[in-house]
Each structure stands twice: as structure tokens, then as C-alpha cells.
Image (spheres, rainbow, N blue to C red):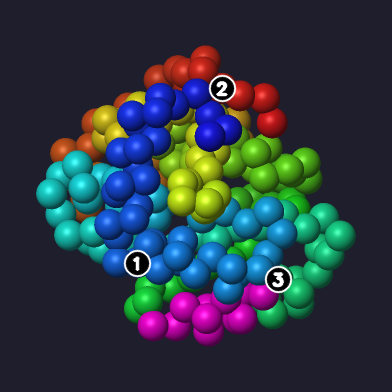
Amino acid sequence: MTNPCTLSEAAKLQRVILNSPALEPIIRCWSAISLPDCWLVAGAIARTAWNDAFAFEPGYGLSDIDLVYFDASDLSEESEARHADRVRRAFSDLGVKLDVKNEARVHLWYSQRFSYEIGPYRSMPHAIRTFPTTATAIGIQPSGSQLLISAPFGLSDLLGTIVRPNKAQITREIYEAKVARWRAVWPKLTILGWTSATPNRITPP
């Protein structure tokens, strides 16, 4: 684990992930991805955990799965697209869209999408640390029979169905639009406002 979560929290998350018909095959066939420092991250993990907490089907509200990797030696859009196409073909039977991105090149297109610039990420832990909420600032990858977890804010918000802003990078507008969509699908989430403080429990990038 590369995070301040407890062993019991990590065990619970692993159970939830490995019981998911969409996520378990990716973990089981991880070698087919074959990308440098690759992690399954963010929304797919959170939505799967929320479905478990609220007794929904594992795939409820799961529209896509984010796989991110870090390759600063090749920042080309063409290479990223080739990798994405290959990985999607490898898992075409999942029935869920796979979004594959090189986090080393996010700064090259971020301003076009969000109207403000960011600096280059230095590593995958650095990138995960900027994800928009404490619950979705998370990545997993298999390590033997266990899951390696990168969760700079721990797992208490995720497993406690609490949505809290992480202001490291996003704006209030982005956060409020995102949580409005989540509230419509998971109305029992505890969603904290933009003025809520980000926890101090954070690991360095």
C-alpha cells in the first residue's frame, strides 16, 4: 500500500474490486495491458465501492473505466491512441468503455478542456494526488495476490461514501458539476460543499 489506509480498509476494497464483473477481469488479466506504471483509477473504483455500500449491482452507474499510465519518454497523442485501441480490443468483451491515458502528457491538452493550464505531472502518485475528490483520488494495480493501492487521502471517505473536494487542481465549478451528476445516481452519498477542507492526511508525491 502507498497510502495511509488501514489493513482492514484495504482488505474491504480488495473484496469489492474482485467481486466486480467489470473490474476483476482487468486485474486478473493485467499483463495484457502492458503499459509503464499503469493504474486503474478514480471513478470506476469509487462507483463500484458506492454500489457495494448501497446494495446496488456492481455495474450500476459504471459508464467507463479509467486506466492511466506514465510514460514521459513518449508524449505523442498517436502513441497514446494506439495503446488505447490495443487495450480496448484486449478487453472488448467487458461491455464497458476503457479510457486509457498517459498522465505524463495531460498538461498538453488540459487547458483546451478546462480553460486553464497545469504543469506536467512528475509521476503517477503526483497525478493521483490531484484527482478532484478525496474519494476518487485512488489507484490500484495487482501485486501478486494483493492489490497495491495508491490513495493519498486514505480510504475512509471512499468506503464511508463521503464526497469531499480536493482543491489541488480543480475549480469549484468542476467540482459542483461532477457531484451534481453523482447525487442523481447515488442520492445517499454524503456530499460536502466546496468550502469543506481537504484532509491533512496526504502522502508526498
Residue 84 coordinates in the image, percent (x, y): 61, 74
Is 57 on the left-hand or right-hand side of 39? left
Instruction: Kindly identify the amino acid type of the residue bearing the numbered disc 2.
Output: Ile
Residue at image coords 26%, 45%: 50
Q: What element carries label 3?
A: helix
Residue 148 coordinates in the image, percent (x, y): 53, 43
Q: Is disc 3 in contact with disc 2, using a CB cutoff of under 8 Å?
A: no
Residue at image coords 55%, 49%: 143
Mark identifier at residue 202: 2
The residue singled out by tag 3 in the image is 80
* Above or below 108: residue 171: above
Residue 94 appearing in the image: yes
- Residue 37 part of the magenta segment: no
- Residue 88 part of the magenta segment: yes
Say whether disc 3 or disc 2 marks the residue closer to the N-terminus. 3
Mark identifier at residue 22: 1
